[in-house]
Image (cartoon, rainbow, N blue to C red):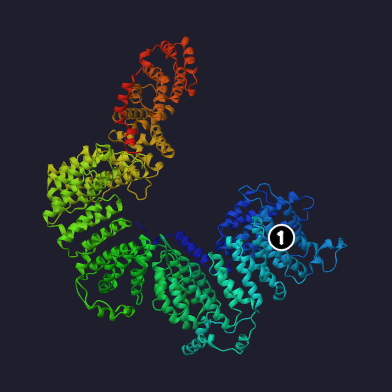
Amino acid sequence: MAATEDQISPAKIETEADAVKLEEEEEEDDEHDSKERVLQRYFLQEWNLVKSLLDDIVSNGRVVVPSSVQKIQSIMDKYQEQGQLVEPYLESIVSPLMLIIRSKISELDSRSDEILKIIKPICIIIYTLVTVCGYKSVIKFFPHQVSDLELAVLLLEKCHTTSSGSSLRQESTGEMEAKCVTLLWLSILVLVPFDISSVDTSIAEDESFCVGDIAPLVLKILGFCKDYLCSSGPMRRISGLLLSKLLTRPDMGKAFTSFVEWTDEVLSSKEDSVVNHFRLLGVMEALAAIFKTASRKLLLDVLPTVLNNVTVLSKSSAATRSPLLRKYLIKLTQRIGLVCLPHRLPSWRYVARTASLSENISTGPTQRLAADHAGAAVSQQESPDDQEDEDMDVPEILEEIIEMLLSGLRDTDTVVRWSAAKGIGRVSSRLTSVLSEEVLSSVLELFSPGEGDGSWHGGCLALAELARRGLLLPRSFPQVVPIIVKALHYDVRRGPHSVGSHVRDAAAYVCWAFGRAYYHKDMKNVLDQLAPDLLIVGSFDREVNCRRAAAAAFQENVGRQGNYPHGIDIVNIADYFSLSSRVNSYLQVAVSIAQYEGYLYPFVDELLYNKICHWDKSLRELAAKALAALVKYEPEYFVNYVLEKLIPCTLSTDLCMRHGATLAAGEVVLAVHQCGYVLSAGCNMGTVLESRPYHRRFQTVFTHVRDSHKRIAGIVPAIEKARLYRGKGGEIMRLAVSRFIECISSSHVALSERTERILLDTLTVNLGHPNSQIQNAAVSAVQQLVQSYLIGNDKKAADLISKHLKHLTDPNVAVRRGSALALGVLPYELLIAKWKDVVSKLCSACMIEANPEDRDAEARMNAVKGLTSVCETLTQPRASDPENDDLSLFILIKTEVMDTLLKALDDYSVDNRGDVGSWVREAAIHGLEKCTYILCKKAGDHNNDSFSSLFDSNLANRLIGGIVKQGVEKMDKLRETAAKALQRILYHETVTVPFILYREKLEEIIPNQEGLRWAVPTFSFPRFVQLLGFPCYSKGVMSGLVISAGGLQKSLKEASFSALLQYLGEGEANEQRSKESAMCDDILWILQEYKKCDRVIVPCLKTIEELLDEKMFLNQEAYTLSFYKGVVDSLAIELRASKIFAKLEAGVVILGYIASVSEPISKQAFSQLLSFLAHRYPKIREKAAEEACLALVRNKTLVTEDKIERVKDIITTPCWEAGMELTQSQKLELCELAGLEHGVVFRTRSRTVTKTMTASDENASYSALVDSSGF
């Protein structure tokens, strides 16, 4: 009994108090914790490990264990996308490592190689941090004393002159990282606030140095950087960064001029080589960095030269081939433009009012309203500087620069367009309002119909940049917003696909930028225009990135633009994760959004005009389902408008349109029926459209809706008449028509007799189609059509059943497949008239066809499924006959159906697709399970003997034994299916299956638990192998187990065989012998039962070989001797005239083992073994000779001691691999020495006999079955 509150112990109270206290401590504010604890909790989780590795490096002054570098790298690589989590630790990591590098540089002159080996691993760690956090975050913690400049140059010189010889190694040697870290170090050291010539100690020793000359230290740096500008690695970019910092110093005028002259030579060079290409990239990147950093006064002198080089290079073939070079050209061009214009903040740009929470709290509602109006008018105010802006002097070359940037927006590569868009934004920010409007007009010209997708994408990026910088004024919205709406739906068909996802993504980015840049008063009307289109893209776009981008843009606008109707609710529905699935977006997200006012009609229009005719078949199918899901909001509108638009489109010349329209029409009709709306109700279309402002443009047609049933029913006959099943797209039209028939049948659309006949004929043809998807769709349609229109019409029902029964024996396998499935879905009212014929014909169809050319695994699988469905349909209780006491039906199920399904478990047919019989076996397992429930339920419901005998012990043993056998075979899926079926049979909630022997043990082996990994061999085999101890199941288990243990798949073989050995090794010695004896009997039974069936015999012989290798059957018991005798007799039959090498090899090995035992059977085995010395295969002769020698060594009784050496000589003398054979005299001598008759050992066979035997064997062999199947 539980303790009361008064009885709770003080210890328990104290424990609970401690727990509460601990929880409160954990919830304390982080400001009370130490910095180390906070960082460890929220940032780098592996900091303790990293710190211990770093402490070891710092304490030793070097990397002692090379693996520690890889560990740190692997930890840091996990933070590539969130480098900010590592930044709080950078000082603790970088500073001590750089101090080690700095301290070691002084020893470079004396021990350069050794010091570099110390420095390089440390540089790998630092460079890893650069790749994760960026160089700007890392170089802040580099030492930057003036004296370090010469040390860094010395280190770079040593790294530059020393090259590693292990460039092909997978792991980095640290050479590249050392150069990059040194160049980054120099990029901050060259910023020392002294003249570099005063820092360079080599000048004191150089008497020729004059004032104004370039310092030797600078010349060294320039030389290294010029070399690295030709590199393809990261040194190129960092060298450009270093040059931008060095050459823009006030004391570097001469060096800057010299470098620009060198770049002029490089850019003017006509050399076409890989090295020159990388040099061009490096020079362009360096110039772009210099133009970003240098003063305008310094750059104006060299600007014409650089611009001329850029203009010429942009028209060269090198730029045409290289997107990266074009990107750098655009980047440099925009920075040249910025140099041409004075730096200024335009007074005309839009500045949105920023509100704060404290401001809103401190002001009243009236004040906030006044502030809103003031904020909205910020961009409209006139400034006294406006006149001065308009009079600004604009250089002539600016027009050329802007033209180059606009052409960059049309580039074929995204990186170039993105750089050009940023350039347009930066240059426009320094222009007057008039010139900026001209630039905007030029950008808008990119959206003309003749432009390609690249222009639309570049234009969207440019508009986004202009909006973000406040350069796109609200007065331009009427021009811009319609273009953005078009871009949101941009999708251009090209062959079998379309382009435009990048344009739609960029258009969503523009909308996102609008939300961030503009005040809500200016955006109110714009958001009303954009919101439906953003949600259309977010719900219905094909690409997940576009859906998420549109949803993010909508979320940004809702969050920043104030109270948008239902905005928060929609944002919660259309979130990042819900839009990840296209199906969920169409059928859940869109349907949920459509409930809000203003979205239903735009959504329907998008689906109706763009998505049901989409080039992607799966999208058309989803669009049809989405339309149906929207019907519930306004069925009348869908009947009177949507259906009237869809019906003519079902005969469109465009395949995509007619396929989508046919699907959509069916789905809408079904949805309307499910809503309870009557299709035939006529109404005034003008009245319907009058109340729909969104659709006033459609108020031109239909005064009355015509008979909807007639128009809908005429769709399929019209498609038939137009012969739209022929040619390209015929298959998908058959699929669509089958689904359409299913939908109108479920909706009980009124059909004429002629239309019914046409629909039935169409479905009959579709049932015989070789495409399984078309067959399955036709089967579903037949089920609904028969239910709705044929029940009660006995003549049509009888004709339909007779037709399908006849088709079960049709030579066309596709017709057989479809008819078997169709019979399975027929209702009870149709089946009851001919149920005996149906059941018997389906049972016959489940059997393997006698003629190999007629065999088809899918037809048999469908027959099994159809047979199971027919039995379920016939035995379902009905209102007219709730007891269903027709005993003959259940007896037929017990005798004929169960027997047929058990035989189907032995269907091991193969063809070029593999074990296709497994499909039949899987269907048979499910069928046996369902029929078992039928028989057991009926037997349990009646107490009389007639019904109670429906399920007996014999049937239970066959059932469990057959399923258990599948549970130990080689296919993972089949093992899982069998195990789960057994689990359901043992633990069924409503039906108890009786007469299961050893039920307790079965329940122990197969517990009633979910999620058991039956498909995993190491899990399933150790369980099922325990059933070998029960005679009623052992033969089935063993026959399945040998196929797995003797198969070719290594993992399966090891798992099954180890489970068998473990089972045999458990228990006392007597118990082990008993298990071994039972296994011997089961193996002999398999050899007899599956005689000449190589599918089972070959793995069985392999299993026997493996067992003999494990020293099994060597205890000289009576059962082992009878086992040897049975195996030798079976081998005499199995190996005769066999051509299967694996079978022959395993048989020879087994004969060698048996010949080694000192019993009378060994003589017979040795005689058979010697016969293989004359086999046609050299490898078999060699193997036989090897086994014979081993047998002579193990068993001294085979040949007398005085003759054994001579026998060995005869056996080992020929070179078997060279194809040598024993001569006739050697054969005679060998038989005489071994005391065997020559005619028995080396039997001669005439060719006629051989051919006859081969032919008879091939009819029953596994290889013949493979050959006949075309494998």
Whether residue 290 is visible to the viewer of this picture, yes or no, is yes
Q: Mark 1 Cα within 10 Å, few/some/many (few <14, many 20+)?
A: many
Q: Where the N terminus falls, by quadrant?
A: bottom left
Q: Is 83 in front, or is 1242?
A: 1242
Above or below residue 507? Residue 952 is above
Estimate the x, y position of residue 1057 in percent, counting from the top left.
Answer: 40, 35
Q: Where the C terminus falls, by quadrant?
A: top left
Q: Residue furthest top?
A: 1202
Q: Quadrant of residue 1059?
A: top left
Whether residue 1156 is visible to the viewer of this picture, yes or no, is no
Residue at left 47%, top 15%? 1210
Q: Quadrant of residue 320?
A: bottom right
Relative placement, left or right, of 205 versus 869 is: right
Q: Is 378 in front, or is 999?
A: 378
Estimate the x, y position of residue 919 in percent, counting from the top left.
Answer: 31, 44
Q: Amino acid at mark 1?
A: Lys
Q: Is 1255 in front, or is 33?
A: 1255
Disc 1 secondary structure class = helix
Estimate the x, y position of residue 187 in percent, counting from the top left.
Answer: 70, 64
Q: Which residue is mark 1?
A: 226
